[in-house]
Image (tube, rainbow, N blue to C red):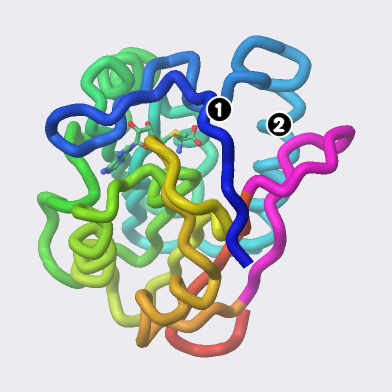
Amino acid sequence: MRIFRKNNSKSRLKKSNRISFGVGQVVGEGASKNLPAFSSRIYHELKTIRKFLGDLHVERSLEIGCGYARLTPWIAEYSEQHCAVEPEEELFNIAKGLYPSFDFVNCAADKLPFPDNHFDFIFTWTVLQHIPPEKFQQSIDEILRVIKDDGVILMAEHVQYTPSPTTWGHTIEEYQELLKPFVLTMHEPRKVESLVDINVGEIMKFKKNKGN
Ligand SMILES: C[S@@+](CC[C@H](N)C(=O)[O-])C[C@H]1O[C@@H](n2cnc3c(N)ncnc32)[C@H](O)[C@@H]1O
């Protein structure tokens, strides 16, 4: 079942058909304005990420739509070489300023400047849900092009909502179909704060074999 989501986001659809994010919108309006909620959310998100990734350690990882690098330092620890891409110039510049030694690239998911079969691990955290339908399939194709055959994809994305001006949910079944031959090996509802029982999407891990 799909549920309509009221759009109260300040994010905007640019002429380029890309959702434009400002610094304050990266983690949602509530948490962005409330420091205790913000720090608690990061704790809960990282705990979940650790549970899903376990002792993963790979050669190359890619984070798509890193924003201002809120999660980047922790995701970078799962590989020898981590690259984070972000299309929004303001966020990209903040990320680079915060972590000058990390590898950031200013680009969008539908045109990734990397060779085929390049990454062992790809991470999207509330990013694909903001890609408009015209660019969505191309973005999925790019992920499947740059990931290695034995790679791992970890994503947190809305899976229920019908289109709003800035968010397009795709069901878990749609993701399973889109990401074939990768298969869903682990998933659970995403909860952002321990005191707030709201489901804001699903954490999904895809690999080619069924083991976790
Ligand atoms: C809700 S924010 C999440 C940022 C970061 N993943 C985090 O959790 O802190 C969504 C991010 O996706 C980026 N984004 C939007 N459209 C994108 C696209 N087509 N390709 C890559 N990133 C995109 C936005 O600029 C923004 O930084």
Q: Secondary structure at mark 2?
A: helix
Residue type, mark 1 in image: Val
CB at disc 2 and ligand 1 closer than 8 Å: no
Q: Main secondary structure of the magenta part?
A: strand
Q: Which quadrant is home to the N terminus?
A: bottom right
Label at residue 16 = none
Left or right? Give the position of 123 relative to 187.
left
CB at disc 1 and ligand 1 closer than 8 Å: yes
Q: Residues within 10 Å of mark 2 (few under 14, many from 20)?
A: some
Q: Name the residue rendered at 53%, 25% in the picture.
A: 8
Q: Name the residue rendered at 48%, 55% in the picture.
A: 169
Residue beneath disc 2:
41
Q: Is residue 188 magenta?
A: yes
Q: Residues within 10 Å of mark 1 (few under 14, many from 20)?
A: some
- Span highlighted in magenta in the image: 186-200
Q: Position of residue 141 (x, y in %)?
A: 21, 68
Among the 4 quarters of the image, the one containing residue 72: top left
Residue type, mark 2 in image: Arg
Left or right? Give the position of 112 relative to 126.
left
Q: Position of residue 99 (x, y in %)?
A: 37, 21
Q: Is residue 3 visible?
A: yes
